[in-house]
Image: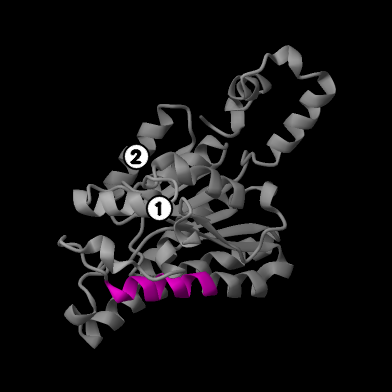
Amino acid sequence: MPFGGEFLSVDWVAARLQVSRAHINPAGESLLMAILDRFSLRGRIALVTAGAGPQFGSSLSEGLAEAGATVITASRSLEANLEYAQKLQARGLDVHGMQLDICDSGSIRALHDSVIQRFGRLDILVNSALARNGHAGGLEDQTTDQCLRSAAGDFAGLFEICNVFLPNMVQHKKGAIINISSIYGVVSNDPGIYQGTSMKQPPTYNFVKAGMVNFTRYLACYYGKQGIRANCISPGGYFNHQPQAFLDRYCERVPVGRMLENEDIKGAVVFLASDASEYVNGHNLLVDGGWTCL
């Protein structure tokens, strides 16, 4: 269910707590609404790169929109973004689709100009896109050129989109940047869960995701006094029709016994985007079911 906007009510909270509204006295109701309002994103403008994607992106966009934000999703396929926006608009959510090639400086700047011209500012930037080349093959399968090309594509895109939108955030003296990293930016992958499958363990993925965490800390320190907060979310494994052997091993190893689902990441992004996390800056929030505890 949504977190904010017109969807948020004391009746909804009471239902979730399985209590009668009569048990929430007027003073308690006022206090309850005060804290829930801290999670509301009404009036905020949010951009999610790869925000119409079948994995994390669409969940991130949906969560922010359910919390009341105006959400822009952007990736290479304009058609896919417009289609996803229409799907959420049918539910009464304020979502818009635009185009972005994270590997193209001109595309990044064109997106910036479109967002600022249409909406006037950007309050929330969620970086979830990966470069076109992606990350493929194990260490022994990659050449130095392939490694540099895939890593540089992601780093350059992340750097440039932050660099382009930050001046607008600084001008308004408020903004939240949320970078989507991975558990593999914190710990190494476990080769054992991949045995007997065709799945590869590309070293560039760990390299990029770990760098993203520390780049986030840099932004947090560099822009903190100008009203900008920067944080990371590092999700655990997401179900994407992986081989059954991998799924069984992963679910056996992770303490909660299952892979990450769409709803699991919504609360994290809403928290870090909202005033509820006003004093949270430079943090890497692990949404991993306890994977990194082991």
Residues 17 and 43: in front is: 17
Density class for disc 1 (Cα within 10 Å; few <14, some 14-19, many ≥20) is: some
Residue occupied by mark 1: 254
Q: Residue at x 73, y 37 (%)?
A: 35
Callout 1 amino acid: Val
Q: Is residue 98 left or right of residue 38?
A: left
Query: Taking 63 as reference, is 153 above or below it?
Result: below
Residue 175: x percent and y percent?
63, 58
Q: Which residues are magenta?
A: 202-214
| Nearest the eye: 279 or 259 | 259
Q: Secondary structure at mark 2?
A: helix
Give SS at disc 1.
loop
Q: Amino acid at mark 2?
A: Tyr
Is mark 2 in CB contact (under 8 Å) with mark 1? no
* Residue lying at 35% horizontally and 78% vertically, measured from the top left: 152
Name the spot of residue 132 as percent of width and height, x first. 27, 66
Q: Is residue 276 visible?
A: yes
- Residue shown at 20% from the left, 85% from the top: 143
The quadrant holding residue 89 is top left
Rounded to the nearest angstrom, the CA distance separating label 2 from label 1 is: 32 Å
Q: Is residue 134 magenta?
A: no
**N-term mark: 2 or 1:** 2
Residue under label 2, please give it.
Answer: 84
Q: Is residue 201 left or right of residue 39?
A: left
Residue 87 shown left or right of residue 267 in the figure? left
Check the image and name the residue furthest to the right.
27
Of labels 2 and 1, the one closer to you = 1
Residue 209 magenta-highlighted:
yes
The location of residue 244, given as percent across then percent down, is 20, 48
Q: Quadrant of residue 43?
A: top right
Q: How many marks?
A: 2
- The image position of residue 50, as x and y in percent, is 37, 54
